[in-house]
Image: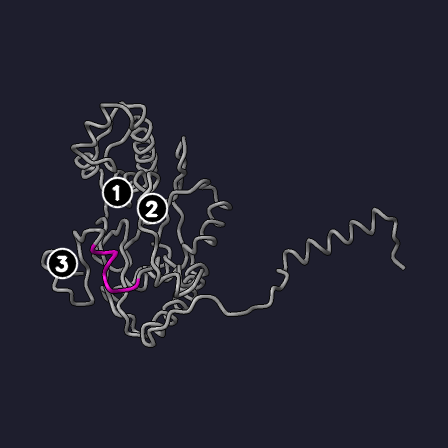
């Protein structure tokens, strides 16, 4: 697999690119997993409108956590951890003049970031995967079915002499890293769509496939003790995710071709979901018991 430095990349596709700035990656004229997730969960119009770009403090702290875990050497160089209890203190304000407010952390924020960093690296499977990986590689390819340019950026990508040794680490913060709650998060945020898309884009970009089980979610909780674990993906998850991204990608290609970006249907029937029907049936049964009705 050939990796091209961003400064030397001529923009040709397929390509595996290192050192690509975040802003350039996110504004590249291609479709990513997050874009497909927006189309899948909402509509092409929501994708075309684009995400709200205003930064918030939680987003800034999330970026700090991401860099501290995946690229600790850069984190130490780019961030200043202060002992200031809040951002109103002179110590924080002086440091922010040098590092910028988004890269200057209060005592509590710094403890949070380093707490997550230490917890993730204490997991031997996570540490082994991250330690052996290239971080923030950008993959570009043409979708074989529609011809549109697609992209993905792996948090951690471990390359090996044989395709079977290649692995992907996908860092995910969550409220609860236990199996059932994290499973619900996978469904809610269509993480399976992203996983399947990443595997396929990397295969198209490199000509090498990665086994499903080598896609790993590194899930960690966003509050002390920052507990977490590593989850392997399975074929049934990947099949579901591939179905979702394929539907969204085909729809995206049609929208590009026609330059039409529809939102929701003009009219729909408000049907009662199955879970609510069951609740109503159970409530009716309970009411029958309470009123003394007997079956005849």
Q: Does the magenta run of residues contain 263?
A: no
Q: Secondary structure at mark 3?
A: strand
Residue at the disc numbered 1? 70
Cα separation, mark 2 vs mark 1, equals 9 Å
Cα separation, mark 1 vs mark 3, equals 20 Å
Q: Nearer the viewer, residue 91 or 176?
A: 91
Q: Is disc 1 surrounded by few (<14), some (14 to 19) or many (20+) residues within 10 Å?
A: many
Residue at the disc numbered 2? 171
Q: Does the magenta run of residues contain 25?
A: yes
Residue at the disc numbered 3? 4
Q: Which corner quadrant of the image does residue 223 belong to?
A: top left
- Location of residue 26 in the rendering, given as x and y in whole percent from the top left corner: 25, 56
Please state the extent of the stretch shown in magenta in the rendering: 24-31
For the N terminus, give its image quadrant.
bottom left
- Above or below, 238 against 60 in this view is below
- Above or below, 243 against 231 in this view is below
């Amino acid at each position: 697999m050939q990796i091209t430095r961003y400064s030397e990349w001529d923009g040709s596709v397929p390509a595996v690119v290192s050192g690509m700035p975040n802003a350039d990656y996110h504004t590249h004229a291609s479709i990513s997993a997050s874009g497909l997730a927006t189309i899948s969960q909402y509509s092409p119009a929501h994708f075309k409108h684009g995400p709200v770009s205003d930064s918030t403090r939680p987003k800034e702290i999330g970026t700090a956590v991401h860099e501290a875990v995946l690229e600790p050497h850069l984190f130490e160089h780019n961030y200043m951890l202060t002992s200031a209890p809040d951002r109103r203190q002179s110590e924080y304000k002086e440091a922010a003049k040098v590092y910028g407010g988004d890269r200057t952390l209060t005592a509590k924020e710094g403890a949070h970031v380093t707490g997550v960093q230490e917890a993730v690296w204490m997991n031997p499977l996570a540490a082994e995967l991250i330690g052996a990986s290239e971080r923030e590689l950008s993959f570009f390819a043409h979708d074989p079915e529609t011809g549109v340019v697609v992209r993905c950026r792996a948090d951690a990508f471990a390359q090996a002499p044989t395709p079977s040794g290649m692995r992907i680490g996908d860092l995910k913060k969550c409220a609860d890293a236990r199996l059932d709650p994290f499973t619900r998060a996978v469904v809610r945020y269509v993480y399976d769509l992203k996983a399947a898309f990443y595997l396929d884009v990397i295969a198209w970009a490199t000509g090498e496939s990665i086994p499903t089980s080598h896609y790993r979610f590194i899930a960690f909780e966003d509050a002390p003790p920052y507990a977490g674990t590593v989850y392997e993906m399975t074929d049934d998850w990947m099949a579901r995710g591939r179905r979702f991204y394929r539907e969204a990608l085909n729809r995206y290609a049609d929208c590009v071709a026609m330059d039409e970006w529809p939102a929701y249907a003009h009219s729909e029937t408000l049907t009662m979901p199955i879970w609510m029907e069951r609740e109503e049936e159970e409530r009716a049964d309970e009411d029958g018991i309470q009123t003394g009705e007997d079956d005849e």
